[in-house]
Image (cartoon, rainbow, N blue to C red):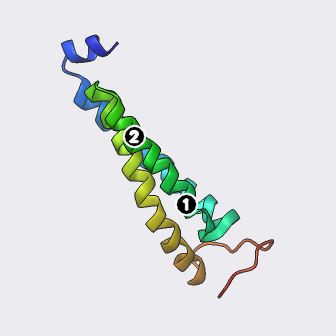
Amino acid sequence: MIDFLSEYRLSGLVIGICTFLIIGLFHPVVVKAEYYWGTRCWWIFLILGLIGVAASVYFSDVLISSICGVFAFSSFWTIKEVFEQEERVKKGWFPKNPKRKYKF
């Protein structure tokens, strides 16, 4: 499969599609994570990011390594977004979880 992508010069296209899908996946994850766990879940994304960095360094194939790197830094970016999501909830842009106590 990797040889096919390299032969027809499709690796960049696949990396772009995977980047789009990974970033698109993280948007609802941020909303749901903040809704159910608040900002306490930031360390989960830190661990996922570190695993992604390790996987990116481990794999020698450019395609797999790139996708792991995109996943890693999307996980790191999600840490920031979880805290910003809390601010959006505070402003009333997103619903509060009625089963959870908020510090604001």
Residue 20 shows up from this direction: no
Position of the C terminus, as image quadrant, is: bottom right
Give the label on residue 1, or none: none
Q: Using the image, determine if residue 7 lies above or below residue 61.
A: above
Secondary element type, mark 1:
helix
Residue 96 x/y as whole percent = 69, 74
| Residue drawn at 60 percent across, 62 percent down | 41
Position of the N terminus, as image quadrant, is: top left
Q: Residues within 10 Å of mark 1 (few under 14, many from 20)?
A: few
| Residue drawn at 40 percent across, 60 percent down | 77
Residue 101 x/y as whole percent = 75, 79
Q: Residue type at mark 1?
A: Trp
Residue that badge 1 annotates: 43
Residue 22 x/y as whole percent = 43, 43
Front position in the image: 55 or 103: 55
Q: Which picture quadrant has residue 14?
A: top left
Question: How many marks do you count on the picture?
Answer: 2
Q: Using the image, determine if residue 87 lies above or below residue 70.
A: below
Residue 83 x/y as whole percent = 51, 72
Q: CA distance from mark 1 to mark 2?
A: 16 Å
